[in-house]
Image (tube, rainbow, N blue to C red):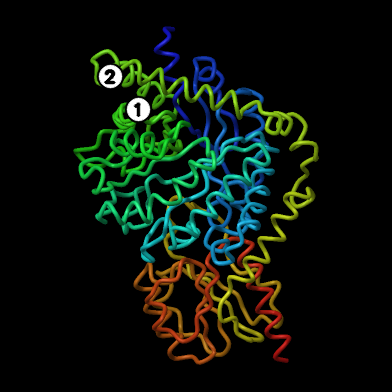
Amino acid sequence: MTELQYAARSVLLAGFAGPVVPSWLSREVGLGLGGVCFYGNNVVPGHDLAALARSVRELAPTAVLAVDEEGGDVTRLHSTTGSPYAGAAVLGRLDDPVVTREVAAGIGAELAAAGIWLDLAPCADVNSDPLNPVIGTRSFGADPALVARHTEAFVRGLASVGVASCVKHFPGHGDTRTDSHHGLPTVGAAEEVVRQRELVPFAVAVASGTPTVMTSHVVIEAFDPERPATFSPAVLGDLLRGELGFDGVIVTDALDMAGAQGSGPDAIGIPGAAVRALAAGADLLCLGPESDPEMAPATVIIQQVVDAILAAVEDGTLPAERLLDAVERVARLREEWAMNPGAAASAATGVVGHAPVGAGDAHPVTRTAREASLRAATAALTNVPALPGPAVLHLDTTSNPAIGETTWGLPCGLLADLRSSVRLGPDDLAATPAPTGATLIVVRGATRDERVWQWVREVVSGNSQAWLVELGWPDPWLDALDRVVCTYGSSAASTEALAAALALASRTRS
């Protein structure tokens, strides 16, 4: 194996499907694989993702181990129960950076106990478009200064327990109506607007010492009208490295997304996307999950990407110096974070610093974070009604891939005199009679599906005791309804806070 072959693997962040370490991973690590990212497809009922992560850590003690653990709606450790930590939108509404830092430390403590030392969080995206299909409650808010101070708090909270942050999605995914998982979004705002809005939180995050920044598969026309940020030297080199002075590791968003590899006859595939991202200035290439059984397995994709990188070096498309620069940056990241006292001790003994990390909320850091999350989620609630003995209808709408198949719903066991609780999909509504009496219609994104939105409007307008509970980012169209409760997230923290508030309002009324 040559130096360049080893180098090409060392900048790759791979994924695998299922709850068991695959047989090929040991070989790939031996050949220089840079690291592993865990996804929702690693979560299987009856299996513990933290235990899986520890197994990978034992196999590859210094490899990058990463996961999307944002708190709120995006969670992997708690995907079967819902996150006990408040999401970004909830924390932004409270606007107490101390609480945000506490929540991030709690999340980090759980990751460190599993041996995971790179959290692909927080989102520094300014959610300036309320109809954004992929950011929404993952953002701290629509005000750049607010997003900046909470991004900094989250970065510092993770670092306090030995976990590296990855601030995303540079230079901003908030002003889009296309999900980059499915297509290529474009931000057409003027340069001055982008500088005063999108860039503000990232500049603060860089100044705060975030060790990694994740790119977005978004075209920012003001800086590069031809290429998404992931492939743009102007965005990654001139803007992020040059103007903002970032000297850490640039991580790509998953390269299997349509915004990167493309689709249809013009698709360049993951190998082509990997070469373009490296050439533009990215250092650590997130290949995405091993998902479709009909597609090539991850080990095949890895080899295809390695071959593409080596061919690009050979033909001059990718300078060898650029590849080796990326290798050096990733190596420094691993040296600083993979074996730092917090993460190393956590992986070996379940210790962060000098405090033992137990399961659930037994550890003081996680307990503080969960208690703070419930307080924040309660403070975020609006318009909670006194509604004794309600029927609860959960309506499913399409979830974006970043959230995945995470368990969600109102914990109805906390409600007194509950009449009924059912879960329906859009296809069920045509045959579902309008409910009468006290009713809570619980939805994540009531306006995402026209069938759901029409049914909700008809029920709320025709039943004076029917309330919509919106768990997603509030769409301006909700103003058309008189009775709406907004939680700004669907995490367990948010739904438990709502159930408690509903119960309290009913008791107070009676």
Residue 424 vs 190, above or below: the answer is below
Instruction: Please indicate, yes or no, whether residue 387 appears anywhere in the rendered image.
Output: yes
- Image quadrant containing the C terminus: bottom right
Instruction: Say what amino acid the circle numbered 2 marks.
Output: Ala
* For discs 1 and 2, the disc positioned in front in the rendered view: 1
- Image quadrant containing the N terminus: top left
Residue 147 vs 35, above or below: the answer is below
Residue bearing the label numbered 2: 312
Percent position of residue 469, x then y: 52, 75
> Left or right: where does residue 289 sit relative to residue 110?
left
> Left or right: where does residue 338 sit relative to residue 429?
right
Instruction: Say what amino acid the circle numbered 1 marks.
Output: Leu
State the residue at coordinates (44%, 45%).
203
Residue at the top extreme of this rendering: 1
> Left or right: where does residue 388 sit relative to residue 286?
right
> Left or right: where does residue 26 sit relative to residue 323?
right
Residue bearing the label numbered 1: 278
Is the Cβ of the residue at disc 1 closer than 8 Å to that at disc 2? yes
Percent position of residue 87, x then y: 56, 58
Q: Quadrant of residue 432?
A: bottom left
SS state under label 1: helix
Q: CA distance from mark 1 to mark 2?
A: 10 Å
Q: Which mark is residue 46?
A: none
Crowding at mark 2 (Cα within 10 Å: few <14, some 14-19, many 20+):
some
State the residue at coordinates (58%, 74%).
381
